[in-house]
Image (cartoon, rainbow, N blue to C red):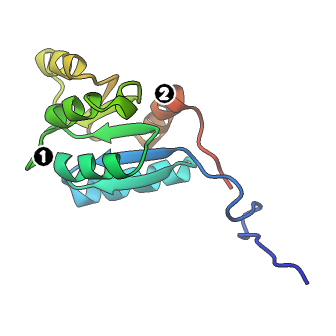
Amino acid sequence: MGINMSNGIGGSVGRRIGKKILAVDDSGSLRQMLTFSLRTGGYQVVDAIDGVDGLAKAQATQFDLILTDQNMPNMDGLSFIRSLRAMPAYRQVPILMLTTESSPEMKSQGREAGANGWLVKPFDPNRLLEVVAKCIGPGVLA
């Protein structure tokens, strides 16, 4: 007698695991939209409410890509990126800023801190998935 591991969507549960993304933003509704969009694209998503929470989660789990807002309480996005880049495990991991900030000065500061790319809110889910796929490859749809 075998165990059926089908999830009903044409795949098998537990067979393939998508790449892990950490989404850091103080807006609960934005975190929900990010999580939904990225999971729909086949990625695993963990969210964090600010840079302090994000740093703790990044220290506990290795992520393939980080998405972060700039303006957050406790630790802003630039400080968060600098802290990540100081960790050997995150020196080469792609980091994307997803923020309302779009000035050339802020983008320059983001690059100096170690951000690899910049997306402006509100985001287009298809564009988000396109950029993420360029950074880490396509998600895995079970």
- The quadrant holding residue 10 is bottom right
Q: Quadrant of residue 95?
A: top left
Q: Amino acid at mark 1?
A: Met
Q: Quadrant of the C terminus?
A: bottom right
Q: Are marks 2 and 1 in contact (CB under 8 Å)?
A: no
Q: Amino acid at mark 2?
A: Cys
Viewer-side residue, 98 vs 114: 114
Which quarter of the rendering shows the N terminus? bottom right
Q: Is residue 14 visible?
A: yes
Q: Which residue is mark 2?
A: 135
Say which residue appears at 23% left-offset and 32% top-offset.
Answer: 81
Q: Nearer the viewer, residue 140 or 122?
A: 140
Q: Which percent across, then down, holds residue 136? A: 52, 31
142 on left or right of 23: right
> Quick one: SS at disc 1?
loop
Looking at the image, residue 50 sits to the left or right of residue 64; the answer is left
State the mark number for residue 72.
1
Which residue reaches farthest front? 88
Q: Earlier in the sequence, mark 2 or mark 1?
A: 1
Residue 39 percent across, percent down from the top left: 51, 53
